[in-house]
Amino acid sequence: MKYPHFRGISYLALPTLRNAHRSLQLSIEFKPESFDGVLLYSGQEPTLDGDFIAIVINQGFVEFRFDCGMGEGIIRSDMPILVNAWNTLNIYRDGRNAWMQLNQGQQIFGHSKGLFSRLTFRLETFLGGSPNISQIVKRVHTNKGLRGCVRALQINDRSYDFYRDTIDGIDIGML
């Protein structure tokens, strides 16, 4: 089976998240080729002002960033990614609380600020990068997209088919 390969300037746009405003279960399998890049994001506004979720690789560690409208929560993996190898990331968010586990590492817990517990999603779900990364750099703290492959993405009860579910994309190779 072939998987989408991202070159750092590419992305896939998947449908807007549904039934994820209160809780979210996400599982992704990815094979990064570098220590920095946007893995996934979605939110309310193109600039990520307002509500959003983002999964970012930052200096080799995975960060789950999310904001329910009153302040960002950041959870950082306890171990670095494996470069040029398959990694599995599991995230669970319920309201303003969340946990994340990378590979066989520990479950890391955290929460967003404030009292709001629901997220509004109006944007598509972007995998591997962004149509305009300069718009989101202040929230994701990188100006790079993913370099590498993604072979599986499941959000809540939906497993994504990268051929049938893609709305838009740019510069995607297949490996």
Image (cartoon, rainbow, N blue to C red):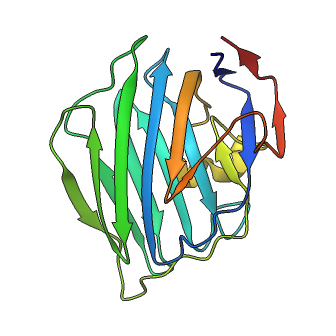
Residue at image point 36% right, 84% down:
114
Whether residue 110 is visible, yes or no, is yes
Residue at image point 47% right, 70% down:
67
Which quarter of the image is occupied by the C terminus?
Answer: top right
Using residue 116 as the reference point, say whether residue 161 is left or right of it: right
Q: Position of residue 4 (x, y in %)?
A: 67, 23
Q: How many marks?
A: 0
Using residue 125 as the reference point, say whether residue 64 is left or right of it: left
Camera-nearest residue between 53 and 30: 30
Q: Give the image quarter of residue 111.
A: bottom left
Instruction: Give above or below for 30 relative to 55.
Output: above
Q: Position of residue 128 (x, y in %)?
A: 62, 34
Q: Give the image quarter of residue 147.
A: top right
Identify the residue at the far bottom of this view. 115
Whether residue 59 is visible, yes or no, is no
Camera-nearest residue between 5 and 113: 5
Q: Position of residue 88 (x, y in %)?
A: 36, 32
Using residue 9 as the reference point, say whether residue 27 is left or right of it: left
Residue at image point 45% right, 64% down:
24
